[in-house]
Image (cartoon, rainbow, N blue to C red):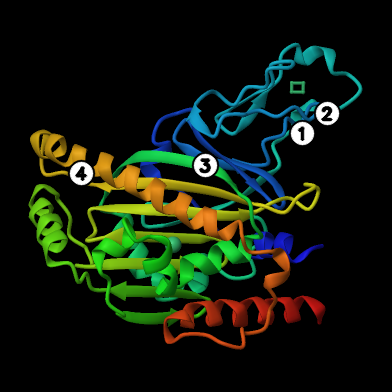
Amino acid sequence: MIFEQQLFKRFWHLVCHRREIQNHGDFVRFDSPCGEVVVFNDNNSYVAFDNLCPHRGARIYSADFGNQAASCQYHGWTYFNGKILVPNKADFNNCDVNKASYNTYLLDWCGDFLFVGISPSKSLYTQLDATAEVLENISLNIEARHDFSRYKYECFWPLAIENALEPYHISMIHPNTLATLELSDGKNVLCEDNSIWYAPIGNSRIQKQIAGLSRFSDIDYKYEGYISIYLFPFTIISSTYGLSYSLQNFFPSSPTDQTEYTNFTSRLLTVNAKSDRAREILKPFFDATAVTNRQVFEEDHSICKKLPKSSWNFNRPKYSADSEIKLLHFRDICKKFSLSLDC
Ligand code: FES
Ligand SMILES: [Fe+2]
């Protein structure tokens, strides 16, 4: 089995926040190197599965997210309350149709963040290490999903991840967006396979403006600067001042796809507001943040497209700036994991 599939199988992956699937029928769908993964709310239980009907294999969900019963459009098999309801069940005499079930995956929570695992090699909290406490705190302050965007990054997935792991490119690639924050070098914390970058904001005007908006939020956790948390292997969460969080998944394409690309999904998750009035006041700021984030990702995508697959390997690059330390850490972890597969 190829490297990407092993990474997908052996690790937990952050797929959504509790608020994204809080009602019966709410779902989020992903493409992964191991096929599709859907997480949905089944009458207030949560189910993750491969999006394939156990009857004759039709896909159940085709949208990226939404609210829809887990019902197959071909012959009407429907998953409800943990069971598959089969129309005309008495006509199934040559098989035990009661045994039909979805091909489900494991789920676990860190605070209000939901993780999916196929056959993870560690418990979720062991995998997350010190990032778990930060994630719990963040997740419990989130109120809603404000924006959802998805497209295919036309590049090999480690290159997209590495681009997100180093701030060295910010002034060149994001001069009118991210660079305006004037982030300082800050501090990198390596937590097992994961890492966190805490960077103070140098632009005092922006700092003041965002700090001013904070009084409309009802939160008990924030980093007063820019924070970027990398969850090995495919997920990044970043935030400016803890008012909203950008959750990004970089899932590799399937080995059966003809060209190499990255299934990129980004969501803007916004935090609890103090009141309805405060929510109204914060809305234009969150709208503007969603637009800026989309622009930042487009800027990243446009440079990532210029990186050929052959520019990546498991070894550390010959030349690297101090600010590229998380990238070096990423390559080391990939190499270690790859070697563990060879044994
Ligand atoms: S393929 Fe789904 S009900 Fe027949
Ligand atoms: Fe970037």
Looking at marks 4 and 1 on the same chain, the residue that comes earlier in the sequence is marked by 1
Q: Amino acid at mark 2?
A: Asp
Q: Residue at x 10, y 38 (%)?
A: 275
Q: Secondary structure at mark 4?
A: helix
In the picture, measured across the screen, residue 16 lies left or right of residue 74, that is: left
The image quadrant of residue 322 is bottom left
Q: Amino acid at mark 4?
A: Phe
Q: Which residue is mark 1?
A: 99
Q: Amino acid at mark 1?
A: Lys
Q: Is residue 96 above or below residue 119?
A: above
Depth check, mark 3 against mark 2: the one in front is 3
Query: In the rendered image, is residue 116 in sight?
Result: no
Q: Which residue is mark 2?
A: 96
Q: Secondary structure at mark 3?
A: strand
Q: Which residue is mark 4?
A: 285
Callout 4–callout 2 Cβ contact below 8 Å: no
